[in-house]
Image: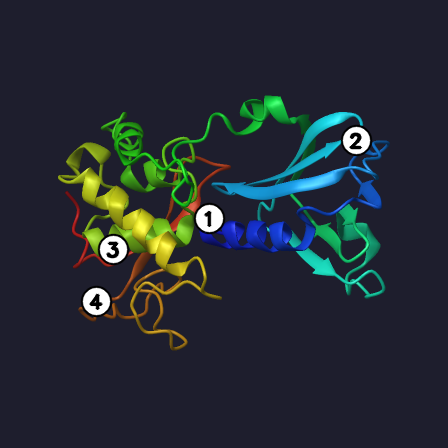
Amino acid sequence: MPEGDAVWRTAQRLHRGLSGKQLTRTDFRVPAIATVDLSGSSVVETVSRGKHLLTRIDGPTGAWTLHTHLKMEGSWRLFRPDERWGKPDHVVRVVLGTAERTAVGFQLGLVELVRSDREDDVVGHLGPDLLGPDWDEAEAVRRLTADPERPLGEALLDQRNLAGIGTIYRTELCFLTGYDPRTPVGAVTDPLRMVRLARSMLDQNRNLPQICTTGDKRRGHSLWVYGRSHQRCLRCGTPIEQAELGAQPRARVAYWCPRCQPPR
């Protein structure tokens, strides 16, 4: 599943390609809104909210927000009107066409249309957005530490606490702060530092094509521990361990160095 910085980049691309343009075609290939036609409306903007995308559209029927989520396999791509999409029709979920560009959403995990004044119904549950203009670090700390017994790795992935952290940033953040991801949140001595580091990591990577947390962009060296099970820790040489963290079906794989991140 894309991390918050990748979703932010997707929002930026859609915003540059569609905002201020009139829609000449809309095609929503999900049953609930399959008959909706917003052609003639204008795209106001696209913004990200954590891992969610909000495309705001204004037209004769009022102000609407197209709410999409990439989930595991989804993507948005922009094409010229006469350009081939390069993927089969059966994976297309949304088409937004203007005179200059066609935006196509492939394999989107979530597609829904809501009145713009009801956006809170779909994203109001999210915690402070790590890349959002309304970032609130004090509220992020409060939410993250609300359940002291909860494993840190689970709390960091909960989008109701901090919006935008995925399994990669969860893993790297725990390593850089020295905590085993199974450590109870209450054992974290400086949650403010952790929250600030999380925001800094996403901010530094949001314009990069791939995540780098080590400062070394070479293949196999850009991440400290994520995806490196049984390989040697880049810092101390100890073999990296992995396990699933969280209850099924939402369990996600976690990686850690047993020496750099001792149990607490």
Label 3 sits on a secondary structure element that is helix
Q: Position of residue 193 (x, y in %)?
A: 19, 44
Tag 4: amino acid: Thr
Q: Residue at x 40, y 54 (%)?
A: 168
Front position in the image: 182 or 212: 212
- Which of disc 2 and disc 1 is earlier in sequence? 1
Tag 1: amino acid: Gly
Label 1 sits on a secondary structure element that is helix
Residue bearing mark 3: 175
Q: Position of residue 124 (x, y in %)?
A: 49, 25
Residue bearing mark 2: 33
Structural distance between the alpha carbons of marks 2 and 3:
44 Å
Residue bearing mark 4: 238
- Closer to viewer: mark 1 or mark 4: 1
- Which of disc 2 and disc 4 is earlier in sequence? 2
Residue bearing mark 1: 4
How many neighbours does mark 4 have within 10 angstroms: few (below 14), some (14-19), or many (20 or more)? some
- Closer to viewer: mark 2 or mark 3: 2
Cβ atoms at labels 1 and 4 below 8 Å apart: no
